[in-house]
Image (cartoon, rainbow, N blue to C red):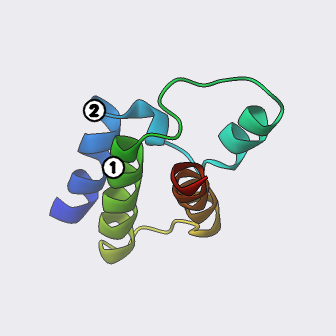
Amino acid sequence: LLLAVGATVPVSFFQPIAAGSGIAEMKVYLNGIHIPGLLRLSTFATKAFSLCCSISSGLVVGTAGPYVHLGAIVGGGIG
């Protein structure tokens, strides 16, 4: 239960852009609409931490969508 709460608190209070899978946000960004905060390092840290906590707590989550968002942040930082 503590890990599940730890997965939701950072997303709910600090980085709401990190909520969800991230695939829809990346489609919007690739179509030319800028979303503030989508490709920031703080979004990466929040999403990675919350994903690790939610998987280790036993919540049923899909990992493909968050990995798309995390990969886009890394690619945006490199490029």
| Number of numbered markers | 2
Q: Which mark is residue 46?
A: 1
Q: Is residue 73 left or right of residue 31?
A: left
| On screen, residue 53 above or below 58 | above
| Mark 2, residue position | 14
Q: Residue at x 72, y 34 (%)?
A: 29
- Image location (x, y in percent) of residue 33: 74, 23
Report, in whole angstroms, how far the alpha carbon at label 2 lies from the one at label 1: 8 Å
Determine whether the residue tagged by mark 1 lies in a helix, strand or loop.
helix
Give the residue at the far front of this rendering. 79
Q: Between residue 29 and residue 14, name the one nearer to us.
A: 29
Up-down relation of residue 41 to residue 31 (above or below): below
Residue 1 visible here: no
The residue nearer to you, when weighing 79 against 57, is 79
Q: Earlier in the sequence, mark 2 or mark 1?
A: 2
Q: Quadrant of residue 24?
A: top right
Residue drawn at 49 percent across, 69 percent down: 60
Residue type indicated by callout 2: Phe
Q: Are marks 2 and 1 in contact (CB under 8 Å)?
A: yes
Disc 1 residue type (three-letter): Thr
Can residue 48 be seen here? Answer: yes
Task: Using residue 34 as the reference point, say whether residue 73 is left or right of it.
Answer: left
